[in-house]
Amino acid sequence: MSAARTAGTRWVRTAAASLVVGLLTMGSLFAAMVALAPAADAADTTASPVTVTAQQQDADVADSPFPNLSVTVSQTKDLVNQGIRLTYSGGTKSTPPSSQNGGQNFLQVMECWDDLRDASGALVLDQNGERQPDRTTCQYGSANINQGQTRTTFLEAADPADVAAGYLYPGAGFSDPPRVSIPFRSATGKTLADVVAGKLVKDPTTGDLPNLDSNEFYGPYTTNEVPWAGFGADGTGTATYEVQTAMQAPGLDCGNPVTAADGTVTGEPCWLVILPRGDHDITAVGNTGSGLLAQTWAHRLAVRLDFKPLGVRCALGAPERQVAGSELVSLALQSWQPVLCNQSGGSIYNVVRSSEGDAASKANGTGTAPLALVSRPLDAATYGTQDHLTYAPIAVTGLTVAFAVDHNSDPLSPPSTDIQAQDALPFTHMNLTPRLLAKLMTNSYRNAVPTTASAVYLAANPGNITQDPDFLAVNPDWAGQLIYSVALADVFVPLGSSDSAWAVWTYIVSDGDARDFLAGEPDPWGMKVNPWATTNAAWDATVNPPGIAASYPTDRFLKPDPSEGRLTSDAKSSIDAIGWRPYSLSFDQGGYWVLRGDPRSAGWNPGVAGGGSGVAAFTTNPRDYPGQQKVMGLTSTAAAAKYQVFTADLKNPAGQFVAPTTDSMSAAAAAMTADPTQPQVVAFDPTSAQAKAATGAYPLTVPVYAATNPAGGDTASRGAAAALIRYAAGGGQTSGTGLGQLPSGYAPIPAAWRTQALAAADAITAGSTPTPTPTASAPPAQLGTAPSSQLPNSTVPTEPAPAEGAAAPSPTPTPTGPPAPVLGAATPDDTGTGALGAAVPISAGGGLLAALAVPFVRRPRRAP
């Protein structure tokens, strides 16, 4: 296994370097990497949960901190870089960590890459005759938030197993105390150790001891270790954990491809280790020793993790095709790719995430262009053309607000003992209304702009959503908390234009309370919209004379407030709202940041005075660990499912709070109505009678279409487009975790959509040219700044007849209500700039990129 792992590590380093260069130079997100090997068979398609107990695995269960501990891991097969959920019971009420102690009665969770072996290389089996993890291969220690969570423990005595292994250094006096230090053996073949055979080992170049807790393999910004996961008063708890592959963690080799004699390719397995920590450890003064000490490690529980092999294996010479546009279908395409490229005449599909409007415009021409992935029809008037596209529905998915927020009851106003008993445990449920989402999207909470900014117009507003009476009215279980975080004053949103942004704003402005709020009307508790984001020109004029009204819906998530503040007294530390609350690169990345509990909060490094080596610069503070997390992000339902984060229930047009599930997205798809400008395309229109009657529908359900002009391209490109559509509408709609299946976060498309997609594929293959679809006969209603009670009636455009020569679309219901309302005047051309003011490290594609810098972002500014 070790030789295979070393070879796999070399492979993944080469692949990672190539991928990063490609992403940075082309601006593309590839659906897959390509290697030359046969495809692996589809694996187990079940959720693959596993439950382990102390009674089963602990050879000394009588001395276990929690003899009745039981831990269920939500998924153990077909893993990628993703989240998994741990639920556990049999513990004792936890005490959170402090600066001097790791806390009491909690779990630590880590990922390890190799099996325990003896000096001859033979496997060392546990009391059940099973393999067991090697503690020296665990990614542990870099959380480093107190003495109880590092690889080194300062103590004079040690367990005989640690002494025999040479991990005890006896010390040489007061300034050189004794220590037990557990090395890290990486999958690359390199071992980091500061104690070998009982002696200190220093770097021959620097003369320093190696840093075992922050090193070339992992550190506080990259580790997936959970240093503290607590129990409630009833001895139960839950935690979300990031599973990393060799792409994110070079010291591990989880998922590196291994080819069997029969040509089958699998991924290298790894271990998930759950380490119980009681009220004290060997130090007898609480938990201040390393969890890797032999006495503590003896009580660990371990679960084998099986990974999909890194890289997608396609036949040599398979042509590469680009598809461009919506990010929402990218995870489905990643799953479909191995099947598609290995079919007869199969292709490799590279996903270029871009504006859906731009992608549709290019696909609308007669030349060869990437297949467009869109959720709305081409805006023919904006692009000065007619719509020649044939639309094939390939996915039902959605958008959601993910959150990672832990209880922290207010000590100055003690709530009930039941509420206090939940401290440091995660909230698992949240309700959001359109008005609350509008507040998060408009910088209207006080902490959404830099703390020292002169934003007097926000002074009376709550600091973040958890302090908002409007939020507590629909989330009474969140009362009694004292939670401060700039990452709860907004949600992570991606930069750029998208159909997804339009869907979110359409949902918001379909609600009368949200429209009134955007128009400058205070909510029942007196909170008002940030005037930089209002549809009321008079309210905007108080900060931006003579006043310009914002327009919604829009296809962008803007941060219009130009306020700046300082992080320190240093004038150089001035930062604006974008640097204060950065954009994410994608919806996937927003979900990833929530998984990690990473608020992306800005810090200031003043450097070293007197011309030292330090350089003054903006920094990003380390993530928060479980027990202290407080962050929200807008993400896709597919990314939320991949990362297994908690998501908010949204209030739908029927007045019900609904979670994003397969059933609720299917209910929304059944209630969708045809777009008045393009009958091939449907959407969930919150103002329609169908939507208002769909009590179980999730309101941010979004369709995704593959669209192209059948008269464009050549026979090969049209055939490749049709092949993708046929698979997506067929075998690609079988739900599961195996290759080629439909991942969680998508609902299977309705039967009528499948019929439409297959007919579209036939038309594209034949190269038939449909007659251009006429545009709407009347513009959408302009609702301006009027309160909802004064909104004028809208004219419903007549639905055009199907275009001649086009593949007949499946029957779609006739819209019975007005099109989605538009608030405010038309948005002027962008004329201004705004500096980001801070470098924003980002990781894309669920961790395929470790970090990327976004040095400057131009802020759209309304012309006076």
Image (cartoon, helix red, strand yellow):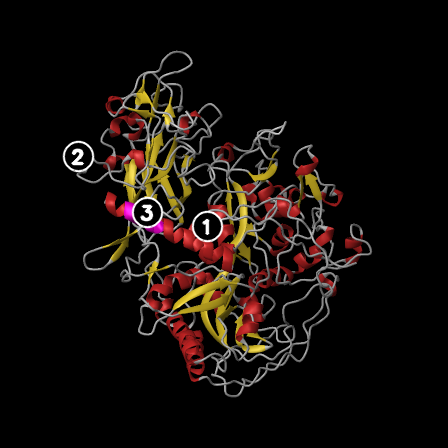
Give x and y (percent) for residue 183.
33, 30
- Answer with mark 1 or mark 2, whichever residue precedes in sequence: 2
The span from disc 1 to disc 2 (Cα, nearest Å) is 38 Å
Report crowding for label 2: few under 14, some 14 to 19, many 20 or more residues within 10 A (C-alpha): few
Name the side, left or right, on which 254 lies relative to 417. Answer: left
Q: Position of residue 797 (x, y in %)?
A: 64, 78
For image coordinates 53% across by 61% down, the residue present is: 700
The answer to which image quadrant residue 218 occupies is top left
Residue underneath mark 1: 849
Residue extending furthest top? Answer: 173
Which stretch appears magenta? 6-12
Report the quarter where the C terminus lies.
bottom right
Instruction: Answer left or right for 553 relative to 227.
Output: right
Q: Position of residue 412 (x, y in %)?
A: 60, 29
* Kind of residue at disc 3: Thr
Q: Is residue 692 in view from this perspective?
A: yes
- The secondary structure that dominates the magenta segment is helix
Q: Earlier in the sequence, mark 3 or mark 1?
A: 3
Does dot 2 land on a helix, a strand or a loop? loop
| Of callouts 3 and 2, the N-terminal one | 3
Q: Image height check: is 19 above or below 726? A: above
Question: Residue 613 occupies which quadrant of the picture?
Answer: top right
Query: Which residue does the numbered mark 2 point to in the structure image?
Result: 120
Quadrant containing the N terminus is top left
In this rendering, is residue 363 above or below 30?
A: below
Cβ–Cβ under 8 Å for marks 3 and 1:
no
Q: Disc 3 versus disc 1: distance between alpha carbons?
A: 17 Å
- Which residue corresponds to mark 3? 9
Q: CA distance from mark 3 to mark 2?
A: 23 Å
